[in-house]
Image: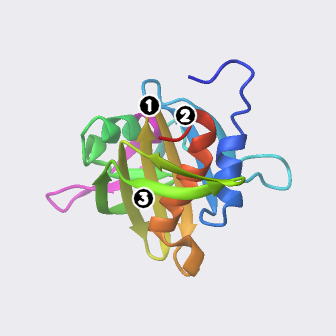
Amino acid sequence: MADEEFDWSSIPYASVESGHCAGALVGEVESGTVHSAWPLTEDGNYSFWLYGDPYKATISKEDGTEVEEDIYEAHNLTLLIGGDSNPMGQGVRVNQVKYMRIRDMEAPTYDFPVGEEDVSFHFDKVWFYQKGKQGLVIAVRDGYFFVGSCDCNKPEQQTALCAKGLAMGAYWLVGGD
């Protein structure tokens, strides 16, 4: 685990600076707590975030009806990581956007340079989501979650590359393989 002096902002910053993610965040699986996100808006607020406080959204139910419900993004993410593919029947939402699941991968490995050295890094699991041309990647390793957004119109920000960008940031927290 990272010590108290660890700069949490370095993880999402490195993911975004890789060029593969438009936004990124890091948090703890057990609590759903987000430690940091990147980038920031001009006034210093996060432009990409996982909401811990509830907000209202219209949910389409399996029987075709629509109901307004409280959405708890952080809690629902912990449910997804725990094995619930459709948390609370609300799907996966990040930054108040609902995404459709495309696929997931068990223990993918990513190779990239760190300084003069080539390193390998694996996640325990990665989920790939999309809404239109907006991609979302959720990855877990060692009790932490890493979430990245990407603009799939850009060749360097396809979801597979966004996962690699997350690995490039997560490396600074948990190290390589």
Label 3 close to label 1 by CB (< 8 Å): no
Which is nearer the eye, 50 or 156? 156
Q: Tag 3, which secondary structure?
A: strand
Q: Are marks 3 and 2 in contact (CB under 8 Å)?
A: no
What residue do we see at 67% from left, 58% from top? 16
Verify CB contact (< 8 Å) between mark 2 and mark 1.
yes
Question: Considering only vertical position in the picture, is 40 above or below 30?
Answer: below
Q: At which x and y percent is residue 53?
A: 54, 34
Q: Residue furthest front?
A: 116
Q: Earlier in the sequence, mark 2 or mark 1?
A: 1
Residue at 85% from the left image edge and 50% from the top image edge: 43
For disc 3, the neighbor class at 10 Å (few under 14, some 14 to 19, many from 20) is some
Q: Which residues are magenta?
A: 57-75
Q: Is residue 128 magenta?
A: no
Name the residue type under label 3: Lys
- The residue at 63%/63% (across/down) is 22
- In the foreground, 118 or 58: 118
* Mark 2: secondary structure: helix
Camera-side residue of 10 and 52: 10
Q: Position of residue 110 (x, y in %)?
A: 47, 56
Residue linked to disc 1 = 142
| Residue 98: numbered disc | 3
The amino acid sitting under disc 1 is Asp
Q: Earlier in the sequence, mark 3 or mark 1?
A: 3
Can you see residue 71?
no
Which residue lies at the image location 51% right of the left edge and 76% below the top edge?
A: 152
Q: Give the Cα distance between marks 3 and 1.
A: 26 Å
Using the numbered discs, state the Cα–Cα distance from disc 2 to disc 1 in whole angstroms. 8 Å
The residue pinned by badge 2 equals: 174
List the single residue furthest toward the left: 63
Comparing marks 3 and 2, which lies closer to the viewer?
Answer: 2
